[in-house]
Image (cartoon, rainbow, N blue to C red):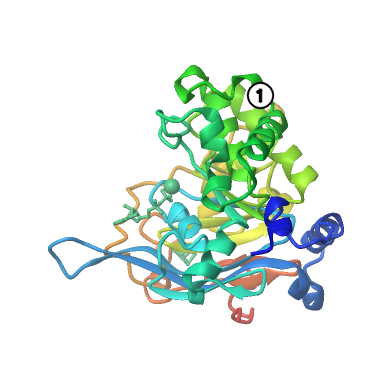
Amino acid sequence: MNVDQEMNFDARPNVSSVPQREAAAAHALDATQPERAATIELVRARGLVKHFPVEGSDDVVRAVDGVTFEILSGETLGLVGESGCGKSTVGRLLLRLIEPTQGEIEFDGRAVVKLKSRELRLLRREMQIIFQDPYASLNPRMTVRDIVGEPLVIHKLGSKEERKTRVAELLTKVGLDPDYMNRYPHEFSGGQRQRIGIARALALNPKLIVADEPVSALDVSVQAQIVNLLQDLQQEFGLTYLFISHGLAVVEHISTRVAVMYLGRIVEVASAAELYANPQHPYTQALLSAIPIPDPTRKRKRIVLHGDVPTPINPPSGCRFRTRCPQAIPECAEIDPDLREIAPGGHTAACIRVPGWKDAPTLA
Ligand SMILES: Nc1ncnc2c1ncn2[C@@H]1O[C@H](COP(=O)(O)OP(=O)(O)O)[C@@H](O)[C@H]1O
Ligand code: SF4
Ligand SMILES: [Mg+2]
């Protein structure tokens, strides 16, 4: 193994991420240029399926049931949907923490599902995950120094002293005092613990961070600080994020694009600006209607969804949302709508009643 490369903690090739980020931003505004899109997709997931067996039965939990999406280099893709719809499973599949039942994942041109263990180990340096609960995800018996430095130890990077320097640098980057590195997680607040989790995720200089509800367990006042920190780090390091949240409010400001999930499927994807201004899928409309508008002169009619989310063991026939959809018609029980581009600029939706859906071509 090349020692110089290994000492340099940087898993990324020697390419400036800034032009990529600009390209991603431009692409978000103009996704009609497929040749450009082809060069800057960091992640491509195609037909991803994850079924979990149900103990003592032949049934399966259809946690993720055929999702196709991409994450562009330098962007934040928000992934939103109610609890249990499969968001975390998507995140874990991308990092290959679990094996897909079906489907393909490409990361930076490499077929993630086919990688052998050594290649997978190298790949893991490039993709990291931050979890929702900073209380549960940090080992209480390890010092902050050991927690943040552990990925470097696992990947055999640097000497003990170099690792200590790196940990100090990482703690400073996330707004923590490096003098506290010998303390334990319980000595920190929830927000500080999430900063520790972020420092650990940054240790190997990843390209992609899956942030799985990183602020859902935090006080509202602290949430904004953590979101701001993630945005600053994205700018500085050219990071790409999959930002998972159960509500649309949290992801609005951080997302370049947003994908909405319902019962194992993606039902709508658009740029954040487009999705919030012009939601097309009835489920997205309902989720959005739950967010209060700060401007008192404007009002949004609250769409209340009735009934519970059906079980992913036995989803409804046709459109999975039909049992709760305020716009359902008899045809919705027959047709299982796929995601189609319903407006130029990459706005896709899976609903037979969205204008333009019936005439739109099926996505590859
Ligand atoms: N390891 C597992 N075994 C069985 N079922 C699981 C497992 N992980 C997740 N599930 C189920 O898959 C569905 C999706 O879960 P998850 O991806 O965690 O949803 P979300 O993150 O959107 O809340 C849920 O019904 C959940 O109970
Ligand atoms: S296909 Fe039918 S049930 Fe599904 S979201 Fe559209 S209108 Fe509602
Ligand atoms: Mg989850």
Residue located at (38% from left, 72% from top)? 101
On the rendered image, what quadrant is the N terminus found in? bottom right
When the figure is inspected, residue 273 is found, relative to residue 26, above or below; the finding is: above
Q: Position of residue 234 (x, y in %)?
A: 73, 45
Q: Number of numbered discs present?
A: 1
Q: Position of residue 151 (x, y in %)?
A: 55, 46
- Identified by mark 1, the residue type is Pro
Check the image and name the residue furthest to the left: 56
Drawn side of residue 122 relative to residue 48, left or right: right
Is residue 299 among the parts visible in the rendering? no
Q: Position of residue 176 (x, y in %)?
A: 66, 24
When the figure is inspected, residue 144 is found, relative to residue 315, above or below; the finding is: above
The residue closer to the viewer here, 287 or 94, is 94
Drawn side of residue 14 relative to residue 92, left or right: right
Is residue 354 among the parts visible in the rendering? yes
On the rendered image, what quadrant is the C terminus found in? bottom right
Crowding near pointer 1: few (<14 within 10 Å), some, many (20+)? some
The residue closer to the viewer here, 352 or 188, is 188
The residue closer to the viewer here, 58 or 340, is 58
Drawn side of residue 198 relative to residue 133, left or right: right
Q: Position of residue 351 (x, y in %)?
A: 52, 67
Residue located at (60% from left, 31% from top)? 195
Residue located at (39% from left, 54% from top)? 324
Residue located at (76% from left, 47% from top)? 237
* Secondary-structure class at tag 1: helix
When the figure is inspected, residue 129 is found, relative to residue 331, above or below; the finding is: above
Check disc 1 and report the residue beneath it: 178
Q: Is mark 1 within 8 Å of ligand 3?
A: no
Which corner quadrant of the image does residue 125 belong to? bottom right
